Amino acid sequence: MAQTTDLDLVHVIKRFGSHTAVNDVSFSVAPGEFFSILGPSGCGKTTLMRMIAGFEDPTSGDIRIRGKSMIGVPANKRPVNMVFQSLALFPMMSVGENVAYGLTSRGVSRAEAEERAGRMLERVGLKGFGNRRVTALSGGQRQRVAIARCLVLEPTLVLLDEPLGALDLKLREHMKIELKQLQATFNTTFAYITHDQSEALVMSDRIAVMNQGRFEQVGSPRELYHHPATPFVASFVGETNKWQGEAAGAAPDGTVAIRLPSGTMVKGQGRVADRATLAFVRPEAIALAQDSSSLGGLPNRFEGRVSAVLFDGANSSLLIDAAGFDEPVRAVLPQAGPLAGIQVGAPIHVGWTVEAMKVFAA
Ligand code: ATP
């Protein structure tokens, strides 16, 4: 039977002394999938990657590549290649030599290695760059050399450890798209680690959100964004409003009434085990109007005043001091219409649906 996964982690645990860096993590990555592990600094993602690459042994559990256990298999015998944040290119070598190096050191003849390196450079858009020093390349071009050097070895799996972290913002935005396109063209399986949710959302087929050594949720970018399974995922992935309150009643259809500390009531959807609750609403789910009648159908409706206009081009936001809310309500600034030019201090009405507000036990 054809192997349906390129990578499987089965109940992997890694302890350093009394500290558990990776705590019972299991997941599978399909051939050709772009799989990201997203989490804050210190959550254990580098440790996880190092175990897949073979630089670290799990305390328990199994790591399989194309169905074969990698336990006891040294790093250089695994069908895996890694792209580091530093890229680790050889500065004294030309671009072509950098790409060919892995092949010649595996016994491929010099002529064949040069030929394959040349073809690979062409595929990553660096035709004619073979004789350049890597020090004479832009950051984005160096990134492509690092990917070419990795892909020329035809690994089953490419591991990428925050490879865009050292680039400036503009180049990072560009490289996100380029990296995703390269991965799709080569159809190679990518496992990518990052603490940057926008990188993970743009590039990945699926994302695992990691927190304190555990996976909180694994899903497509849309699933994580629209249906977060935990409060951590709701606040870590994407912008959100977050309010604390107390559950004050739940209906069988999953509608939960929440009392905010001011006594104001809001209605959302979720399951609450305790009284203490957290409620999340995305800024783009907040409807805005100058008069309350146009928000008539919404169960959550409040009066407020604009406290800040955060202009950022297409992604501009409004902060609104709304009656009954301790924290400002964040909403998306409309690009057109009567609210597009709204000023600080202007009165405004906000509203949202029950479905837009995700409720969790705190
Ligand atoms: P960052 O994004 O900052 O690199 P990370 O999510 O990759 O963070 P890890 O580097 O995997 O996190 O570290 C997870 C935890 O394990 C941290 O608390 C770290 O201090 C600890 N840790 C990692 N390597 C070792 C080690 N060799 N010995 C002891 N503790 C370690």
Image (spheres, rainbow, N blue to C red):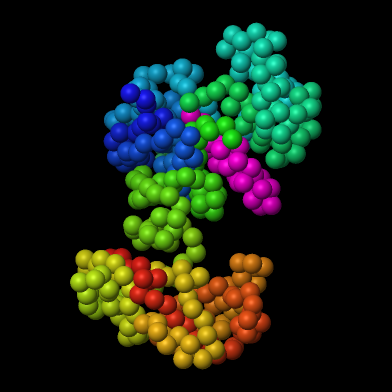
Q: Which image quadrant for residue 234?
A: bottom left
- Quadrant assignment for the C terminus: bottom left
In this rendering, the answer to whether 70 lies above or below 350 is above
In this rendering, the answer to whether 243 lies above or below 134 is below
Would residue 65 be counted in the magenta stretch? Answer: no
User: Is 5 placed left or right of 342 in the picture?
Assistant: left
The percent position of residue 18, horizontal first and vertical second, equals 30, 39
Residue at left offset 45%, top offset 55%: 222
Residue 225 in view here: yes
Would residue 176 be counted in the magenta stretch? Answer: yes
In this rendering, the answer to whether 92 lies above or below 181 is above
Q: Give the range drawn in magenta.
A: 157-184
Q: Which image quadrant for residue 232?
A: bottom left
Ligand 1 falls in which quarter? top left
Residue at left offset 70%, top offset 27%: 121
The percent position of residue 3, horizontal first and vertical second, equals 37, 26
Q: Which of 65 and 279 is in front in this view?
A: 65
Residue 100 in view here: no
Q: Which image quadrant for residue 78?
A: top left
The percent position of residue 134, horizontal first and vertical second, equals 74, 29
Q: How many marks?
A: 0
